[in-house]
Each structure stands twice: as C-alpha cells, then as structure tokens.
C-alpha cells in the first residue's frame, strides 16, 4: 500500500506544469571549439543555436573545418591538433562572445598563418589580457590592442609548457590555458581559483585527454600533458541553468504557482543561484539526477513563495551565479530587510556593465539600492512591492 501511495505521488508530481529550455550555451560553444580539434566526426544534439554559438561555428569554418548544422543537431568534422590550414591574414569574428574570442586564441597558437581575432563594438571593450598574458608565456607570438580586441596571432617559433597561477576565478582564462596546453609538448601545470569546470569535464569524459585534477581548499591544481589527440565524441547537450533561471524567478514571484524544468545542467559550479535563492527562503529541489559525461543533470522543481529573507552573501558563491545576479537582485527586492552582495567586479566585465545596469534598473523600479566599496551592492527589500507597470515602463523606456 505504501509503495502504491509513493508511486501515485510521483505520478501526480509529474502531472504538474513542466517545460524544457534550450541547450546549455557554455557546453554548446565548447563542443563546437573542442570537437574541431578531434580527428573525425563529432555530433551534438540539442545544441543551442544562439548568436554566440553561431559565431563559434563561423570561426572554425574559416579555419577549414566542415560543420553541418541541422535543426538542433550539429556535426563537426574535426581536423586534429595540427590540421588547421587557414589562409594567411584570415579574420575571425567572435561577434559578442567573450568565450569564443578567448578560447579560439588557444586553438590558433601553432598555426603557420597570421590570424586576426575581432568582435563587435561591445566585445572590443572587454578585457583580453587575461588570456594573452598566459599565452605569451607559452611562447605565442600574440599582440593585443592594449589588452583589448583585435588580437593578432602570428607564427610562433618555439612553444613550451608553463606553470600558471590564475587568480581571477575565470573559467574562460582557465580554459584558454588548458586548450593551449594540448598543443605544446610537455606538461602544463595550472593553479586556479575555483570556477566553472565544463572544460575539465569535457577533456576527461568526452575527449579522453589525460588530465590530472587535484582540489585544494582555495585552488584547483590541473596538470595537462600536451600533444595528445582528442578523441571523437558525441554529446547530448542538457538545458541551460541560466535560461531556466528566468522561469525559476518568475515562478517564485508569482502567486500559487509551481513548475518543473526538465533535463537541466545542474553542475555544482553553475547552481549558485539555486543555493542563494534557497538561502533567501525559496524551496527549489532537484529530481531525476544523473551523471552524463561528468556533468550533473536533473529536473528542477520550484514553487512560488510569499516571503523572502534578506541575505549577506559570502562572495565564495559569486562565481557559480555570475550570470544570474540581476535575477537574484529582483528577489532581493521582495526580501524583508537589507541584502548585501560583495566583490561583483566581474559583472561589469561582461558584454555590458551588468552591476551598474542592475542598480539603474532597481532604482527605476523605486527600490532603494546603494553601490558600496569593493564593487558591492546593498538592496533594501520591500516585501509588499507592487510595480505599477505603466509608470515603470515609461521611466525605463
């Protein structure tokens, strides 16, 4: 009888409203770039067809890689570590994608051609020195425009492995060093602040690249042996936690609503928003959890809440929620008390100054908000907040 009741509850649970969201952007971009280094055909399903992913595809096509994109399936015929033979003075346009711009540089370090990497007006304002500095240590003949795009990469005479300390907690910087290490004879040793680990997982569980990872209290130690050809692989890309976060917050702030979001990448380095919202009084849960190529995937259940509590967030959660902070700020508006978030300088190094924009948006909504030292922000919550849509849109438009 108990077993019957449990089964019935499970059936009733999954009769609740459920949705799927588009494929994970970080995994989609990494699939495109890393599969180009394999020696054969790699296939991804549920790939995200966003502008950033399309920019990655256009870049590797210019390097001579054949890519077939059909609906949500992407086939890449990799050229191997040494198979790229682009024309001299080829220009690669990363569009608005910092991930593409930074990671493609590492793919180019052993070419015999002169390559220019550029992007749109917004991307040209973003810091590229975080990857050009370590690449120069490898011996790469690379020039940037005072730490910005465009970047020029020319034939490098002698590449060597490096030891590098990454202090920013930047997954893009870490990934750039890791990809460059593949093209260099010897072992590259990387000590880095914890950040998203998609590249490590893809190296180990999809590409079958020899990689050693040792986690310490405040740093990760990563050793990579170069000149090991990546294996051919297929990938089923799960849903994007960033896309799911909009529906999570919308459900939380609605009245008497619940939602299941299925097949989401809940990698521990990406679910900072879930941990933070639960600290603020939400009750967001994971179900049907499984491991796929090292990534943790599951369904997310969220229901609306009437009361939220303010928070003074420990900055150690910042990296795992860096793309979702503006949504977290919205929930902070409904909290009882003052919420404080610190050390958010990375928000202003995105495609726009997200921290400054977040403050502007909340101020326009009538919320008391203050930027504090060390790129922090204080938000005074209004539990009974009720926006007057006409006034709000008039002010902000």
Image: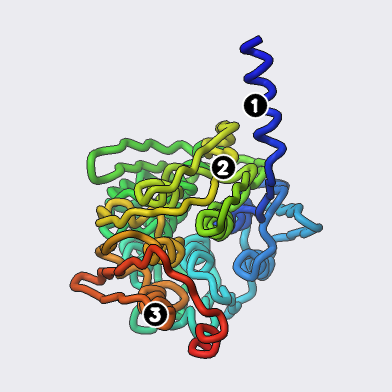
Q: In terms of depth relative to the viewer, which is nearer, 314 or 15?
A: 15
**Residue 361 found in image quarter:** bottom left
The label number, if any, that marks residue 9 in the structure image: 1
Marks 2 and 3 in Cβ contact (< 8 Å): no
Q: Secondary structure at mark 1?
A: helix
* Mark 2 Cα-neighbour bin, 10 Å: few <14, some 14–19, many ≥20: many
Q: Position of residue 176 (x, y in %)?
A: 43, 58
- Disc 2 vs disc 3: which is toward the camera? 3
The residues tagged by marks 1 and 3 sit, at their Cα atoms, a distance apart of 43 Å
Q: In terms of depth relative to the viewer, which is nearer, 251 or 360?
A: 251
The residues tagged by marks 1 and 2 sit, at their Cα atoms, a distance apart of 14 Å
- Disc 1 vs disc 2: which is toward the camera? 1
**Residue 293 found in image quarter:** top right
The label number, if any, that marks residue 226 in the structure image: none
Q: Which residue is mark 2?
A: 301
Q: In terms of depth relative to the viewer, which is nearer, 52 or 360?
A: 360
Q: Is residue 109 visible?
A: no
Closer to the chain start, of discs 1 and 2, is 1
The label number, if any, that marks residue 366 in the structure image: 3
Q: In terms of depth relative to the viewer, which is nearer, 126 or 320?
A: 320
Closer to the chain start, of discs 2 and 3, is 2
- Quadrant location, the N terminus: top right
The residues tagged by marks 2 and 3 sit, at their Cα atoms, a distance apart of 31 Å
């Amino acid at each position: 009888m108990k077993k019957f009741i449990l089964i019935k509850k499970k059936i009733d649970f999954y009769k609740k409203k459920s949705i799927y969201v588009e494929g994970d952007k970080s995994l989609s971009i990494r699939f495109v770039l890393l599969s180009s280094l394999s020696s054969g055909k790699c296939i991804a399903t549920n790939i995200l067809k966003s502008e950033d992913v399309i920019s990655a595809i256009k870049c590797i096509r210019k390097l001579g890689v054949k890519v077939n994109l059909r609906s949500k399936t992407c086939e890449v015929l990799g050229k191997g570590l040494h198979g790229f033979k682009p024309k001299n003075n080829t220009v690669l346009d990363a569009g608005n994608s910092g991930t593409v711009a930074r990671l493609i540089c590492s793919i180019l370090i052993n070419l015999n051609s002169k390559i220019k990497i550029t992007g749109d007006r917004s991307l040209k304002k973003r810091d590229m020195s975080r990857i050009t500095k370590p690449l120069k240590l490898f011996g790469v003949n690379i020039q940037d425009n005072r730490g910005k795009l465009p970047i020029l990469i020319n034939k490098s005479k002698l590449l060597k492995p490096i030891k590098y300390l990454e202090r920013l907690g930047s997954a893009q910087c870490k990934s750039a060093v890791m990809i460059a290490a593949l093209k260099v004879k010897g072992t590259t040793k990387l000590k880095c602040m914890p950040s998203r680990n998609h590249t490590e997982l893809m190296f180990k569980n999809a590409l079958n690249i020899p990689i050693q990872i040792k986690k310490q209290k405040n740093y990760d130690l990563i050793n990579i042996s170069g000149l090991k050809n990546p294996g051919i692989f297929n990938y089923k890309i799960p849903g994007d936690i960033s896309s799911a976060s909009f529906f999570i917050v919308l459900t939380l702030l609605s009245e008497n609503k619940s939602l299941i979001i299925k097949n989401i990448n809940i990698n521990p380095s990406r679910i900072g928003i879930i941990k933070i919202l639960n600290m603020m009084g939400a009750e967001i849960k994971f179900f049907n959890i499984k491991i796929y190529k090292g990534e943790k995937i599951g369904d997310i259940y969220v229901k609306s809440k009437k009361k939220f509590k303010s928070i003074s967030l420990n900055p150690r959660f910042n990296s795992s929620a860096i793309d979702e902070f503006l949504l977290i700020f919205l929930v902070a508006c409904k909290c009882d008390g003052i919420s404080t978030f610190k050390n958010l300088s990375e928000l202003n190094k995105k495609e726009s100054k997200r921290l400054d924009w977040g403050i502007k948006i909340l101020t326009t909504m009538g919320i008391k908000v203050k930027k504090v030292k060390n790129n922090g922000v204080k938000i005074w919550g209004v539990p009974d907040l009720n926006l007057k849509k006409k006034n709000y849109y008039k002010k902000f438009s």
